[in-house]
Image (tube, grey):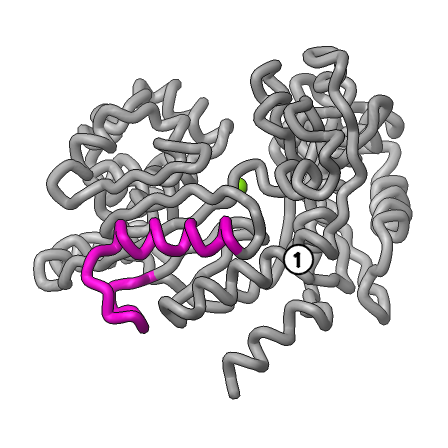
Amino acid sequence: MSKADLIAIAEAAMNDMNSTPVRKIVHVDMDAFYASVEQRDNPELRGKPIAVGGSAARGVVAAASYEARKYGVHSAMPSVTAKRKCPELIFVPPRFDVYKAVSQQIREIFAEYTPLIEPLSLDEAYLDVTENLKGMEIATEIALEIRTRIKQATGLNASAGISYNKFLAKMASDLNKPNGQAVITPKNGPAFVESLSVKKFHGVGPATAEKMHRLGIDTGADLKEQTLEFLVDHFGKSGPYFYGIARGIDERQVKPNRVRKSVGAEDTFPQDLHTYDPAREGLQPLIEKVWSYCEANGIAAKTVTLKVKYADFNQITRSKTVPVPLAAIGDLEDIVSFLLASIFPPRKGIRLLGVSLSSLERTASTAEPQLRLAL
Ligand SMILES: [Mg+2]
């Protein structure tokens, strides 16, 4: 899509805004989900700093309990770092079957209110409750009722954000976490965004935040000062999204049963890599990240792609497709190692590595609810 097209589409969407009725979006997010499930099921873990996933020696933390977060432990942190920050940290192996079952329970509760449910992961979803099955007028009441029902059914706490679009609902669910909810109204939305650091924006990752910082954009107010053209110049397809959210505008619909085409993770290294071992090591957290995402979302993949960006910014990919979906993380590790070996010795230093999975299939347990909905 050309830059002019992007700008024209974004401008048309902004103009449409005035004619679209206000929507009511709820973002529900379970509190420290995996860790809370483990503490629920094992009383000995309650009140203690725990990390789900990883081990004291290797891997990354998939989820940390609130007790662990006080020490600065958070998800995606290397386990070794986590253990250093919190020596009493207890590592608990993940039980995805249990998390999936709880996720199913909460989705059944959501479905009593609206068919417009868009899960972001096992423990998070957007709900469009503008027209809802209970005929309830007030979205904050719906959110409160859903959280109460979740607590009764699962024993777990959820937080919620209520607003007139997905971006603000997502931002709002963090405001009174844990076990709380917050509403952002059309009246206070723009001011809320202006005061916020762009680092906190959903859709602005660390690399983008850094780029924005270099451009002198640190807050929503800074972002709002930029023209649409400037943002498209610097951020391409994300430009119109950033232009909108800086004004509290986000026209994305709540899309039920989103099926992804690929799942990927990548990382830029502080220093270019020239030898195999550090490169393979750098890939391990990415492998674990995409694998746990797939596991958590009931997805299996047949194609593995390794992305390599060299110091001169040239980029190559190497893929391998297997006849049946990968069943174990060990299979993924083997294929990634094989693909990585195939590009060694590298023609330049390696700046970035990425792993993605495609040719995705739903595994049986999560295909079920969709079938039931269809009936
Ligand atoms: Mg959560």
Label 1 CB-ligand 1 distance < 8 A: no
Tell me where residue 187 appears, x and y as whole percent.
11, 41
Q: Classify residue 13 as left or right of residue 99.
A: left
Tell me where residue 40 appears, x and y as whole percent.
66, 41
Q: Residue at x 66, y 57 (%)?
A: 100
- Residue placed most toward the observer, 149 or 19: 149
Question: Does the segment drawn in magenta span residue 151?
Answer: yes
Residue 197 visible in the displayed image: yes
Q: Which residue is mark 1?
A: 100
Question: Does the segment drawn in magenta span residue 138?
Answer: yes
Q: Is residue 66 above or below residue 63?
A: above
- Residue placed most toward the observer, 322 or 189: 189
Tell me where residue 39 appears, x and y as whole percent.
68, 36
- Residue placed most toward the observer, 119 or 270: 119
Q: Is residue 126 above or below residue 232?
A: below
Residue that extends furthest to the left in the rendered view of this protein: 18
Q: Amino acid at mark 1?
A: Lys
Tell me where residue 38 appears, x and y as whole percent.
70, 40
Q: Which part of the image, by quadrant, shows the N terminus?
A: bottom left
- Residue placed most toward the observer, 294 or 211: 294
Q: Classify residue 30 as left or right of residue 73.
A: left
Q: Would you identify the image quadrant in which residue 93 lies?
A: top right
Q: Is residue 11 above or below residue 41?
A: below
- The secondary element bearing badge 1 is classed as helix
Q: How many marks?
A: 1
The residue carrying pointer 1 sits among few (fewer than 14), some (14 to 19) or many (20 or more) residues within 10 Å by Cα, namely some
Q: Residue at x 64, y 73 (%)?
A: 367
Q: Residue at x 61, y 14 (%)?
A: 71
Q: Is residue 292 above or below residue 234?
A: below
Q: Which residues are magenta?
A: 128-152
